[in-house]
Amino acid sequence: MKVLVPVKRVIDYNVKIRVKADQTGVETANVKMSMNPFDEISVEEAIRMKEAGTASEVIAVSIGAQQSQETIRTALAMGADRGILVQTDEQVEPLAVAKILKVLVDRESPDLVIAGKQAIDDDSNQTGQMLAALLGWSQATFASEIELGDGSAQVTREIDGGLETIKVSLPAVVTVDLRLNEPRYASLPNIMKAKKKPIDMLTPEDVGVDISPRLATLKVVEPPKREAGVKVETVAELVDKLKNEAKVIGV
Ligand code: AMP
C-alpha cells in the first residue's frame, strides 16, 4: 500500500509572529521555518505503517518555494522513501493545493493520503477535505487513531467533548490531530541517508493546475494587547472586582 503525505513549510511554531506594518500579511523574511507540526504527525504515522509492514512506500509532497525541499528532506530523514516538490514562489491557497495533490494522486495511485488537520500559518483546515471531494474518496478528519483493515480504515476522530470512531473504505484521505502520535526526531545517520533519496521537481504548469488566487486578504491585524493585571490585597477586594468591574460573577 502506497501512502502519500503532504508536508507544508510554515513559520516555526516557536516564532513570535509579527504582522507586517501595512497589514497585508505576516513577516516571513528572516524567520525560522519548519514542517507544519501536524504534518510531522502524518509523516510519523505513515512511517509506522511502513514499519508495521502495512505500507510499502511513503511519498512526501510539498507545494511551495524551493526551500520546501528542506521540509521534504526532513520527512525523508524521518523515514519517507521519496519526495515530490511542486515548486512555486506564489502563495498557494488550499483549493489550488488540493488540485495539485489530486493530479499527483492520479499519477501515483496511493491508497491513502495522510494530511495535517490544518496548517498553522493559514489555519484553513480545508485542504484534506477539498482533496477528498475532488477525488471522490472517503475522508476521515481529526484522526487520533488509525487502524488499517482489509480495504478499509477504522479512524477515531477527535470531536467536541469526545471521540467518534468511523470506518472508511480505502482509498481515503485522513487528516490527523495532535494526539495521534509523537513524531520521532531524525537521527544523524538517517539525515545523511535522506540526502540520497530522490525528490522529483515539478511546477504547477507541469501538473496543469492554475494556482491564481481566488481569495483576497483584506487585512491582517495583531490580537489585542493584554492589559496589565492588578494586585489585590484581600479576597473581599478580589470578589468585589470580579463582581463589579469584570462582571464575571453574579452580584
Ligand atoms: P490547510 O487546509 O491549509 O489548513 O492545510 C491542511 C493540510 O494540508 C496541511 O497540514 C498539509 O498536510 C496540507 N497542505 C496544505 N498546504 C500545503 C502545501 N503548500 N504543501 C503541502 N501540503 C500542504
Image (tube, rainbow, N blue to C red):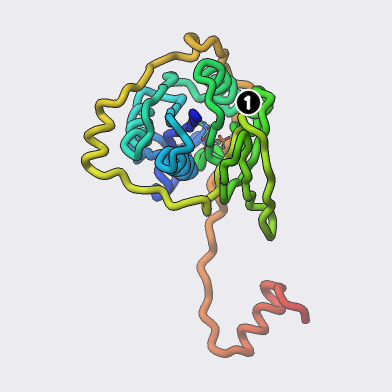
Q: Nearer the viewer, residue 101 or 238?
A: 101
The quadrant in which residue 245 appears is bottom right
Give coordinates of residue 228: x percent, y percent: 51, 67
The one of 123 and 251 positioned closer to us in this rendering:
123
Front residue of 228 and 150? 150
The residue lying furthest to the right in this view is 251
User: At 61% across and 46% down in the image, what residue appears?
Assistant: 142
Tag 1 residue: 215
Which residue is at 77% across, 78% downward? 250
Question: Horizontally, is 168 left or right of 220 in the view?
Answer: right
Residue 116: x percent and y percent? 53, 40
Residue displayed at 49% across by 14% down? 204
Residue 126 appears anywhere in the view:
no
How dense is the environment of label 1, judged by Cα within 10 Å: few (below 14), some, or many (20 and up)? few
Give residue 126's position: percent from left, percent from top.
Answer: 62, 34
Q: If the image is split into quadrants, where does the C terminus sit?
A: bottom right
On screen, residue 51 above or below 76: below
Q: Nearer the viewer, residue 144 or 48?
A: 48
Q: Residue at x 44, y 38 (%)?
A: 53
What amino acid does circle 1 point to? Leu
- 240 to 20, vertically: above or below: below
Above or below for 178 versus 42:
below
Q: Position of residue 199 (x, y in %)?
A: 35, 22
| Secondary structure of the residue carrying numbered label 1 | loop
Left or right: where 178 falls relative to 138: left
